[in-house]
Image: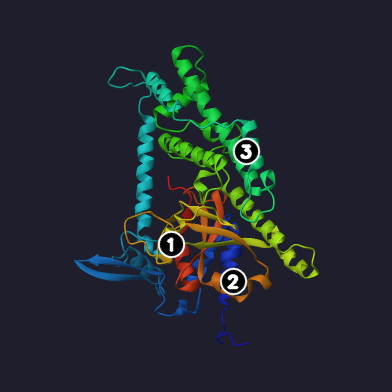
Amino acid sequence: MNPNQNFQINFVEVIYMISEIQYGGRITDNLDRELFNVYGEGYFRETIFTDEFNLGKVAREIDGKESVFYYKIPKYVDWKDYVEFILGKDLPEVDSPEIFGLNNNADLTYRLKETGRLITTIMDTRPKDSGDSSGKSRDEIIQEKCRDLQHQITYEYMEIEVKEILAKMPGPKGYPDKGMLVPLNIFLKQEVDRMTHILYLVRKTFSDIIDAVDGSIIMTPDIVDSIDALFDGKVPKRWVNDASGAEISWIKSSFPLWFASLLERNLQTNTWLRNERPKTFSLAGFFNPQGFLTAMKQEVVRLNKNKGGGGAKGNTDSLDKWSMELVDYSCSVLNERQQREMENVREAPGEGVYIHGLWLEGCKWRKDTLDEATEKKMTYPLNILHVTAFASDAKKGGRPEQDRRENAYNCPVYKYPMRTDRYLVFRVLLPCIGGSSDASMWKKRGVALLCSID
């Protein structure tokens, strides 16, 4: 074998070995591994050996003149040349987020988070026993605040009344059953139970603080911790996590945001319980948004099985396709005209649900597609999203479904602005003009949908 003979490099295998095994095998988050594969596909390719190949480019200004700097792989022999290249004046002093495929707003996001941490640290280190100009002590200030907030919690849920209402509650249009035989009604009951528990904790904390400051009961460590948290504008830990550390409510950065969310969630739950099923839902208003979407999927499956029922032999194959194992989410974003028409719609859709209140991070929604974020804004509102289910087997999907996936970005939806598997709700296919190459760009941008931006 001639050692000087040129040989072909299989870059598909190189990418797989690096992105999935040698380095990717250490990545536990599936979405992080997808991002790592995107970087691998961008870096390891045939053009890597050409002079035109670059890892990224960034616009900069030198002596009042604008220019573009390309991050290229230096081709030297002596290590001193590499050191001079690194320490030289050619490389930018500060690397732009653009070389990693991020938007310029990523740097602004980083600085805002650092500033927030600094302010939080200052707040944590200030004296705890200070009062206000009126001469009231810290405990008296919080006691008065608790009395005011108690009156804002208006809705209550009596267990017997809730069961009676749910027993009569119908399903979606065309659904054969009602009451607790409807999946979303079962989900509503679970949400009511969890909301009842949170309302009890909040009321008890307020009541205990008022009585403890008056001297009617002993000032326990839990009460002291709650007073400290409320005085600092934070949420008492026992409202968010139980003794085991499990999340029992929702995460917010401050007490005002948490309490406002409590009132909004309680209003959405009470409105759904006392009235008919809402036209649109807010995922940010649920304890368990994944459970909400699973219940919706169950309803769609049963609706389609009911349509194909009747015992005919020809319907057997069709019914087999509509099982939870073979059903996937199907999402579409409403355009401006459809959103205006939603105002005149009086009832919820027969299949699926409409979701409002989602936020795009990393880009914006413009003319029914993803678009670059040019303003100094971190998030942009998304139009109302229609989520339903479809039989995802090969015969049902076919080429149109494959084309739709190839020309869309598989966008993750997170419960909070925290990118972990724990808070991943589901994924939405958002159309993008450039197909798979454009989808890779949005992946590098870190584009995601957020249920809450607080």
Q: Which residue is mark 1?
A: 445
Q: Residue 65: which quarter of the image? A: bottom left
Q: Secondary structure at mark 2?
A: helix
Q: Could you give the CA–CA distance between mark 1 and mark 2, rounded to whole angstroms?
A: 25 Å
User: Could you say which disc has been placed on residue 165 in the image?
Assistant: 3
Tell whether 337 sits left or right of 311.
left
Provide residue 282's location: percent of width, then percent of height. 50, 48
Counting other residues with Cα less than 10 Å from the Cα at mark 2, is it few (<14), some (14-19), or many (20 or more)? few
Q: Is residue 383 left or right of residue 66?
A: right
Label 2 belongs to which residue? Answer: 401
Asked which secondary structure carries label 3, the reply is helix
Q: Amino acid at mark 3?
A: Ile
104 and 251: which is toward the camera: 251
| Among the 4 quarters of the image, the one containing residue 380 | bottom left
**Residue 308 image offset from top left, x and y in percent:** 72, 64
Q: Distance between the Cα atoms at labels 2 and 3?
A: 41 Å
Seen from the viewer's position, the closer of residues 306 and 48 is 306
